[in-house]
Image (cartoon, rainbow, N blue to C red):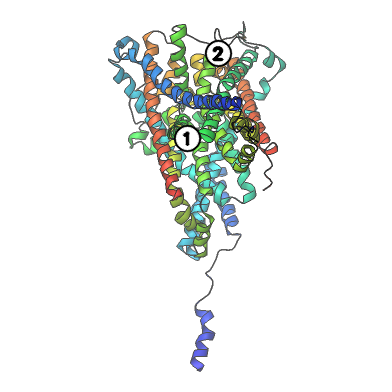
Amino acid sequence: MTAVQLERPTTSRRGDAVFKALATAAAVLILVALAGVAVFLTLEGMPALQAEPGALGGKDNIVLYVWPLVFGTLLAAFLAILMAAPLSIGLALVISHYAPRRLAKPIGYLIDLLAAVPSVVYGLWGIEFLGPRLGTSYGWLEDNLGFLPFFEGPASGSGRTILTASVVLAVMALPIITAICREIFSQTPTLHQEAALALGATRWEMIRMTVFPYGRSGMISAVMLGLGRALGETMAVAMVLSATGVVTFNLISSVNPSTIAANIALGFPEASGIKVNVLIFSGLVLFLITFVVNFLGRLIAARGQIKEGR
Amino acid sequence: MTSTQDRVAAAPASIPLTRPQLPSWAPLLVAVVAVAAAALPGLLLGWGLAPMVLIAVVIFVVALPTWSSAVEGSRKAQDRLAAALVWAGFGLAMIPLGTLMWQVISNGVPVLSAEFFTYSMRNVVGEGGGIYHAIIGTVIVTACAALISVPIGVMAGVYLIEYGAGSRIARVVTFLVDVMTGIPSIVAGLFAYALFVLFFGPGVRMGIGGAVALSVLMIPIVVRSTEEMLKLVPDELREASYALGVPKWRTITKVVLPTAMAGIVTGVTLAVARVAGETAPLLIIAGDTDSVNFNAFAERMATLPVYIYYSYMQPGIPPEFGQERAWGAALVLIAIVMALNILARFISRYFAPKTGR
């Protein structure tokens, strides 16, 4: 009786320790990788602070070089979200509340298809299809709304303007925002919705009284994440936009501000020496902007979850 | 007495119990009228299709709520307005998808041929040539990216659910993984370049660098899907395994992971589909070439998205051949990405564990 071994065999304990160490290492590696992105970009970007005007496209220092790009990035992303956010919330409502149940799933797949299209193909579509078609309507905008600074003109015939680029960005941000919103909307407690309907609310009143208040933080974070995507999107903008690197609010002329990402994509393959550092520095700026936007978006989402928990 | 009875009898006539309602065919009627009202001047004055559709939608969105507010009151009218707007938005969102697919297919299909799939662009000027080298490059780079990110992503997911659940590190990692999903792809490319420059000197271009950049984008997706799937594994399974004396790591490898396998494979497939279409990081670190390169550790490596970009933007002279090839390659790339997506759905549907609930 005394010979019963109470201890576990040591091999399995060693296996446990090794496996746990591996798993922990993988998790920590992710943190290291994220920190590495910031560190390596800083290392390679810092020499740009001493760059001469020759490497900065004639600008005196790096701040003057990056500022128009930041402006273009923010302008294009802001316009894109202005278009995409209401549309995606509507789309999410179609899937979660308006479409008959049998149709809702295929519609969801269709939206996911939009997310699956590679960005370079969106670029092709923007140049070949969207640009020329929007180009004709830009002439109309210039004639009729030319008193607004946004539509001052002269209208670009090819349509390769910042407005076209933001339409493409909006299409690309659409599926992301829709996916998150639809998830949130379908989680609205059924009892709340039925209570509203039982009180005689119409469907729209029910949505306004139950679905929107419940999903507010989710919707905000979805829009933030879509904004993050629009800020960092590269190829579509690089292909569609004919950029000259100016700061202007004129949305339909052929003189447009460039975006950080597009500028890197266009300049990097041929860049050498200090110009590479300049581009990496602008990439660091882009990284910081998107990091802050995504950080805020996730923070708002996390806040919302805590509220639900109570 | 008689007066009360009179009042009761008169009540239904003076206060109706139901509100007046538009007939169920009202939206259809308004739609037909709107289309007719837009098409008539449109055809007479020779407008295009787009303005006619736009005007028809505007007429519908204005007319139906107006009629409804006259008959049914403002609340119903608002409801109808919201529904009309939401569906119009859906139609608007389908335009890009429809036109894009149509354009890629109609421009791409004529280009496809046996030569297109089996030739590289080496020594090709003008007509001819193909995407063989780009397909090889995409397969190598994506496979390397998957080799890097799947072990790291799955193990990190295991840590977050099985070991670190609730701990501070786990919460920080979960949050940062979420933030990491938002890293712009071009920044991932710059990171890979900045990393490889330290070892190989300025101007470095190689396939494995592209794989590193893509794994920065891929790891968060793999971690998230692993996490979600491990959460779905019932605790009873783990407890049953522990009760039989199985150590924790054997429980994870033999019970938990196999149960969640279908979901994890789905997540990995979706992640591969996402990065296979990435252009920007590969443009920066993998570069482009006209020849076949099987070695990920040396020299430039062409990939499909980069091939599309250069074929279209720098098509050579005369430009039409390069642009044709770009459309053909775009069709192939979309087909690959869609196939991966469908494969993922197939896996998740047919290999999901039967919970019996």
- Residue in the foreground of this view, choosing between B44 and B148: B148
Residue A170 tag number: 1
Give the labeled residue for mark 2: B207
Q: In this view, does A52 lie above or below A30?
A: above
Are labels 2 and 1 assigned to the same chain? Answer: no
Q: Chain under label 1? A: A
Residue at the spot 38% in from the left edge and 11% down from the top edge: A275
Around disc 2, counting alpha carbons within 10 Å, would you say few (fewer than 14), some (14 to 19), or many (20 or more)?
many
- Direction front: furthest residue: A2
* Type of the residue with mark 2: Gly
Residue at the spot 42% in from the left edge and 21% down from the top edge: A37
Image quadrant in which you'd find residue B231: top right
Q: Chain under label 2? A: B
- Direction right: furthest residue: B114
Residue B142 tag number: none
The spot of residue B27 in percent (x, y) is 57, 56
Relative side of A289 to A188, left or right:
left
Image quadrant in which you'd find residue B207: top right
The spot of residue A55 in percent (x, y) is 34, 11
- Direction bottom: furthest residue: B1
Whether residue B277 is visible = no
The spot of residue B133 in percent (x, y) is 63, 13
